[in-house]
Structures are given as structure tokens and as C-alpha cells.
Image: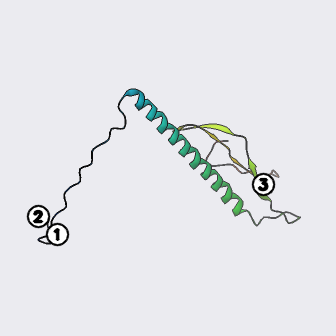
């Protein structure tokens, strides 16, 4: 057998035959595999959502790091996490712990305190 990309006189190695494995044979095993995949998807979605929420809070706080009060303390700081709650996503129901922000700035037009509101999760 000649191969146009090889110089003449160089043999083409024989193709290695790899047998195909069967992972799932019966319906019960298929159901268990689906359940395992669902858990993997949910855990991945939970981790990605948690990372996105942490990043969102970090960006919010970093953009306001220069704002200081009368005593020199920062007016916008992280303040732990809210209670765990369950939200429904396309992947299923996920428990999240949203980071909290203590924003002590006051809106000059309304006189009310400014609040952090996540654009990722509903209130």
C-alpha cells in the first residue's frame, strides 16, 4: 500500500485493532448511569454558579474599594454568606450560598443605603 505523504520504500505501520467496550448492557445499568450523569451535571452547575457569584461580589467590592467613611474604613465590604437556598436551573434544583455585601454608602438623591443586587440570581 502506497502513501503519497511517505517517501518511497517506507512501510506503513499496521493498524492496531482495538475492541469496542460495552459500558451499559441492561436497562437497570442505563438508569444508574443516567442518575450518575445527572449528579455530575448538577455538581458542575453548582460549582460554576458559586464561582460566578463569588466573582460578581469581588468585582463589585473592588470597584468601590477607594470609598472610605469618616473614620477611614471601607464603606463596601464582604460580609459572609446568606443562608442556603434552592434555585431551579435548566440542570435541575441547586442549593446555593450567595455571598453577602455590607454596603454602607448612602444614595444622595433618595437618602437610602445602596445595596448589592446580583445580576445572576433572582432576589
Mark linked to residue 103? 3
How many numbered marks, from 0 up? 3
Q: Nearer the viewer, mark 3 or mark 1?
A: 1
Q: Which residue is mark 2?
A: 2
Q: Secondary structure at mark 2?
A: loop
Image quarter hosting the C terminus: top right
Is the Cβ of the residue at disc 3 closer than 8 Å to that at disc 1?
no
What residue do we see at 80% from left, 51% from top?
113
Q: Secondary structure at mark 1?
A: loop
Image quarter hosting the N terminus: bottom left
Is the Cβ of the residue at disc 2 closer than 8 Å to that at disc 3?
no
Q: Quadrant of residue 67?
A: bottom right
If you read the primary sequence from the N terminus, does the residue marked by circle 2 or circle 3 appear first?
A: 2
Mark linked to residue 45? none
Residue 82: percent from left, percent from top = 73, 44
Q: Which residue is mark 1?
A: 6
Disc 3 from disc 1: Cα separation? 69 Å
Residue 32 appears anywhere in the view: yes
Q: Is residue 30 above or below residue 20?
A: above
* Local crowd size for mark 1, using a 10 Å CA cut-off: few (<14), some (14–19), many (≥20): few
What residue do we see at 27% from left, 45% from top?
19
What residue do we see at 52% from left, 38% from top?
39
Residue 80: percent from left, percent from top = 75, 50
Of residues 20 and 46, which is closer to you in this image?
A: 20
Q: Quadrant of residue 103?
A: bottom right
Residue 25: percent from left, percent from top = 35, 31
Of residues 79 and 72, which is closer to you in this image?
A: 79
If you read the primary sequence from the N terminus, does the residue marked by circle 3 or circle 1 appear first?
A: 1
Is the Cβ of the residue at disc 1 closer than 8 Å to that at disc 2?
yes
Amino acid at each position: 500500500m502506497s502513501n503519497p505523504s511517505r517517501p518511497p520504500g517506507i512501510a506503513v505501520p499496521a493498524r492496531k485493532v482495538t475492541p469496542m467496550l460495552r459500558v451499559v448492557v441492561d436497562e437497570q445499568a442505563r438508569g444508574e448511569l443516567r442518575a450518575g450523569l445527572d449528579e455530575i451535571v448538577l455538581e458542575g452547575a453548582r460549582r460554576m454558579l458559586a464561582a460566578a457569584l463569588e466573582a460578581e461580589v469581588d468585582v463589585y467590592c473592588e470597584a468601590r474599594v477607594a470609598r472610605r467613611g469618616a473614620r477611614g474604613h471601607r464603606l463596601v465590604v464582604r460580609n459572609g454568606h446568606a443562608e442556603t437556598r434552592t434555585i431551579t436551573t435548566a440542570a435541575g434544583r441547586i442549593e446555593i450560598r450567595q455571598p453577602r455585601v455590607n454596603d454602607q454608602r448612602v444614595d444622595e438623591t433618595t437618602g437610602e443605603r445602596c445595596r448589592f443586587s446580583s445580576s445572576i440570581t433572582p432576589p
